[in-house]
Image: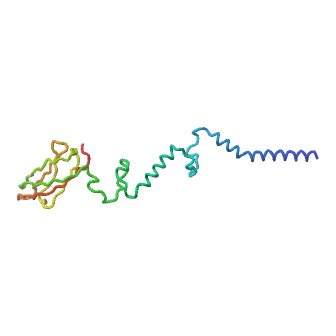
Amino acid sequence: MKDLLRTLIAAIVGAVVALAVVVGQPALAGQVEKAAAKNSVTSKSIKDGTIKTKDLNAEVTGPLAKAGTALQSVPDGSVTNTKLAANSVGSTKVADHSLKLDDVSVITGSNVIDFTPQNVNNCTVAGPIETGHVVTGALILVSQPFGVSGAISITTQEVASPTQFNIVACNVGTTIAFNPPPATFNWAVIGNGS
C-alpha cells in the first residue's frame, strides 16, 4: 500500500509540475520577446505580410502618407518630365513614333533665306544664324524646303561664335546654274555641344 501511495503522490507531483510548465509557457514566451536585444530583429526574422501600420512610427508613416496622397493626385497620362527623376525613363518605356523634334532637340528655329543664284559647283553661305545656345560639336539638322531640291545640297557650317552656324547651299552634279526661290529653313540643334 505504501508503494501505491508513493506512486500516486509522485504522479500527482509530476502532473502539477507539468501543468505549471504548460500554463507558464505563454508567460515564458512573453519573457523571451522582451529579452530580444535592441536592433537584433531584422527583415529576415519577420514573417512577410505581418507588419501593420500600427507597428511603424511616425518617421515612416508620415512620408508614406504624403507619397500616397501625391500619387493619387496624378491622373493617368499626366506625368511630365518635371515630375520624373533624371534618367528614369529608358527607350523601352517610350511609345514608338511618339517623340517630336522638340522632345529630342536642345533648341529649334527657322529662317527665311533667299540664296543667290547657284553656279555649277558653287556654294553660297547664309548666316550667321544665332541660336542662343552653344552649338559647337552639336548635331545641327536643317530641313530641305520645298522648291530647293535636286542639285542643291544644304549643309551647315560652324562659325567663330559658339552659338551660331551658317546654312550652306551648293549646286553640285549639274551643268547649269540654279536660282533657288526664297524659302523657310527649319533647323534643330540636337545634343549639348561642347
Instruction: Estimate the x, y position of residue 134 in percent, counting from the top left.
Output: 22, 44
Counting labels gives: 0
Q: Nearer the viewer, residue 143 or 177?
A: 143
The relative height of residue 85 versus residue 178 in the rendered view (above or below) is: above
Left or right of residue 136, residue 182 in this image: left
Left or right of residue 125, residue 40 in this image: right
Q: Quadrant of residue 10?
A: top right
Instruction: Estimate the x, y position of residue 15 in percent, counting from the top left.
Output: 81, 47
Instruction: Estimate the x, y position of residue 70 in percent, counting from the top left.
Output: 43, 51
Left or right of residue 97, residue 108 in this image: left
Split into 4 quadrants, where in the image is the C terminus?
top left
Instruction: Estimate the x, y position of residue 94 in percent, counting from the top left.
Output: 35, 56
Instruction: Specify how the rendered protein is coloured.
Output: rainbow
Residue at 11% from the left image edge and 58% from the top image edge: 151
Residue at 36% from the left image edge and 48% from the top image edge: 87
Residue at 48% from the left image edge and 49% from the top image edge: 65
Q: Nearer the viewer, residue 68 or 173?
A: 68
* The residue positioned farthest toward the right in the image shown: 1
